[in-house]
Image (cartoon, rainbow, N blue to C red):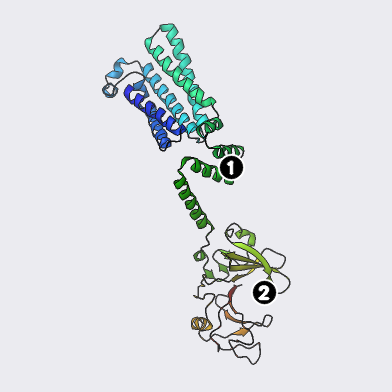
Amino acid sequence: MNTTVRVLSVNAWIAVIFEFFLIPGGGVLLVLSMSFLAIYYILFGFAYFNKLDFKQMVNPDTYDTLPQTKVFAGVGLGIAFGVVCTGILFKLQFWPGGDVHLRTGLILLTMFLIFNVYKYFKTKSKYNREISLRVLLFTALGFVIFSISSLSLVKTQFRNHPQYIQAYELHEEDPTDPILIENLDLEYHRATLTKEDFENYLKYLELEAAKKTAFSFLDYPISKGRAGNIKVGTSIRDYEKQLKSLKKRETDAYQFGYDGGGVAQVYFYKDEPVFALIPALETDSILAIIVMNENFQTVSSVRVGMKVQEVSSLYPNVKVQINELMEWEEIYDQKNDFQLVFKTTDEDRIGVYAEYKEGSAPINLTSKLEWIMIR
């Protein structure tokens, strides 16, 4: 039992030295050694503090001669030592809860120390003297670590890395700020990695940032009254967080065939227009969704950029109408309430019209679909 504790304790001290000199593997060694030491104390403290070897520990006859008070004292001491080991580990790793564990363990150890000192002066027992010395040394170590602030530990451990110390001080002032958390993590890697590994880490962060800002067109299938979960009649505000990866610009809603002086919110991904949300005048309620990118597909398999010939194959016997306000041409999907807009002029009309109000079968099949209007 003594040998096991000595080995684990030596490993723990080696890990502390590695950690404070930022030697690779120090953190892992510290976690393993202190965790095993804490578990060992908690599980086998009753045997360790009563100097029982493994054979004695598993032999039921041992406990016929060993006073129950010593067994219970060993269990309590094991738990107290284990809690202090956990607190030291958490404190040195800068994990939340280190001081709480240390405070709890030290209170328990102080109570055991007072009791054992009292028993020693009363009985002069060698057992109480040895236990008192062990508890005193461990309590002193725990109090020293407890009394050192986390900032002092950081300044010692990262003495050659002032950028990390500065980042830690800022983080201490506002622990919940996500920007300060990211900066602290960045400076930690700068301090602990080699130059080459840190450059690779920066590349990894760039890739992760690109994933976060990427826009998935597959998440926005076009169906009646909606693009993905964006629905006509709902508030634009409801989707601000969802669409934060896109750039937003305001433009006149008249460009999309809506007069009356309203505005349209046009969203861009990699400088290409994705879609526009048109609110009802002087409100935030979505009146129409304008799909402007060929990467979207409707439930009827229509895509922006398709030629009239391709669209016609999806809508047999379709008729083309002229928008009297804007003078471009449109095909109406009655089932899904889509307006398919072709920004043609008199020079490249799709149909032939006796009057604007009459529809026409498609004649010019080369014009391309400009956008899809969801109403």
For the residue marked with disc 2, what is the amino acid? Gln
Q: Which residue is mark 1?
A: 176
In this rendering, position of residue 26 left or right of residue 340? left
Q: Going from the N terminus, do you reach mark 2 or mark 1 first?
A: 1
Judging by the rendered image, the residue that carries numbered circle 2 is 255
- Residue at the spot x=40%, y=29% of the render? 14
Circles 2 and 1 in contact, beta carbons < 8 Å: no
**Quarter of the image holding residue 275?**
bottom right
- Callout 1: helix, strand or loop? loop
**Residue 186 x/y as whole percent:** 52, 45
* Residue at the (71%, 69%) spot, across then down: 262
The kind of residue tagged 1 is Thr
**Of the pair 129 and 194, the residue shown nearer to us:** 194
* Residue 12 horizontal side relative to residue 252, left or right: left
Q: Is residue 1 visible?
A: no
Above or below: residue 140 compared with residue 370: above
Observer-nearest of 285 and 134: 134
Classify the position of the C terminus by image quarter.
Answer: bottom right
Q: Residue at x 54, y 25 (%)?
A: 147
> Is residue 29 positioned above or below 48 on the image?
below
| Residue 30 occupies quadrant | top left
